[in-house]
Image (cartoon, helix red, strand yellow):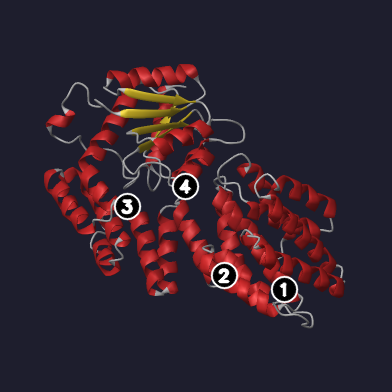
Amino acid sequence: MNSNDNKEDVSFLESLPRIDKFTGIRESEPLPRNNAFKDSLPLQGTTVLILDRSAPSTKHLKDELAQMGSTQFDVVNNPNDFFRYVLERNYDFVFCDYNIDERRNGAVVMEELRTKQAAHFGSSIIVVSGDRSSSALVGMMEFEPEAFLIKPFSAEELSKRVIRIHARRMVLKAALKAKHYKQYDAALVLCDEVLRDFPQYDKDVFRLKVEVLLQAKRHDEAEALLKNHTSLQAPGWIDLTLARLSRIKGDKGEAESWLRKAITYAPHFIQAHDELADLLIESSRVEEALSVLEGLSAVVAPSIKRLRCLSELADLQGYDDKKRNYLNRLIDRTVGTTLVSANDFYRLAQAQIDNQRPDEAYKVLGRMRSVIDAAEAEMAENLLIVYGHYLNNDVERARADLEVVVKKQISKGIQLCTEGRITLMTLCARLGLLKKAESLRQQLLKTTASTATVLRIHRAMQTPAAPAKAAY
């Protein structure tokens, strides 16, 4: 790889809406002027976790960081050990190689890391990648690594990047800690102190203050701060945050305007696309939401969360082939990770019944047994049998079998995952067990976060029911 290639990568990354955890602004500010960063060992005493299968790459990284003062290194070559270490210890730097294995690349690991909130709030996450494609880099952006390093990287490039990250992290450390422990007034005071002593970090301080106010639910103050700083070089993020505040106020029209402005400014701003799709779903504009997410998927590989949403939107629109495709991709992506979910297996098995392929449905159930207990697996199988009877217009048999399933579920206290409860609710609604259906609906709405899932629940309850016979 020549030097011009590396310059192109840096230029591409700088064009994105954010490349670090705070502002995503180009890292052009000077280092802080204090004794802590004049030391010949600028990373003295820092701890490092490295996830990488390549021994030469790991050695190069360790040697260079040790020369800058890092003293403790943990090196792992698989995601399972990586998560064990992340959960057990606090690190200053966490390096994650993008090309971990065929099934579980760096994007999946980063999504697991962020979804599970596994990393300590003081850790700086840096992705190392030999994949220079724009789709791979953009796909990592939504998981907010602090920086990217493109292999092969020089000692000078590594030094410049990590010293700058560590300097900024040390300057903001006290304010970040106060925010983490919900000491909001203290965090805001500390932000002002940073701004006074290190004015070159004005953009970082601005963003951190907004996040503190949002976390404290001081929405009016956050909105005022945002609108007073629209001249900062982060309009995409500002527009996105103003959209979220508009949604909190219940002004969907204003929220949509802010989101479309954000996307116009930064077409690769993944969070703005997701937020717009969620807003459209909330307004029952499902086809538009599907179009937004499918358009984004043409540019960047969809995350696990986005694949789930796409499968639900395809379901709502009756696009059965698309739904099965998304669910198959979703299961293939999550098996063997901490993000695997019985819900996806439930939905794919039911989709195979819809497609009159019961043998395929039973194969899916067989795979699902690895993620649920035996009692729930048996319940899932029984529910799909009832569903098959219903689709075959054998309503009396379906109702009789469903009554048995409901009694068993109540008597044995069998806990079902979200999709198991949705399937049970849907069958109860369609077969006349209306009291049980309504009870399940109320439970689901209290615990379901996905806007698309909520819409599916409401639509399932609107389906005309067969004549009622029993009530549970």
The secondary element bearing badge 3 is classed as: loop
Give the mark nearer the N terminus: 3 vs 4: 4
The amino acid sitting under disc 2 is Gln
The answer to whether mark 2 and mark 1 are in CB contact below 8 A is no
Q: Nearer the viewer, residue 142 or 340?
A: 340
Between label 2 and label 3, give the one nearer the viewer.
2
Q: Which mark is residue 443?
A: 2
> Looking at numbered disc 4 in the image, what kind of residue is underneath it?
Lys
Question: Looking at the image, which residue is at 32% across and 60% down?
Answer: 215
Marks 3/4: CA–CA distance:
27 Å
Measure how far apart labels 4 and 1 are at the Cα level: 34 Å
Q: CA distance from mark 2 to mark 1?
A: 14 Å
Residue at 52%, 24% (x, y): give it: 53
Pointers 4 and 1 in contact (CB under 8 A)? no
Dot 1 or dot 3: first in sequence order is: 3
42 w.r.t. 459: above or below: above
The numbered dot on residue 116 is 4
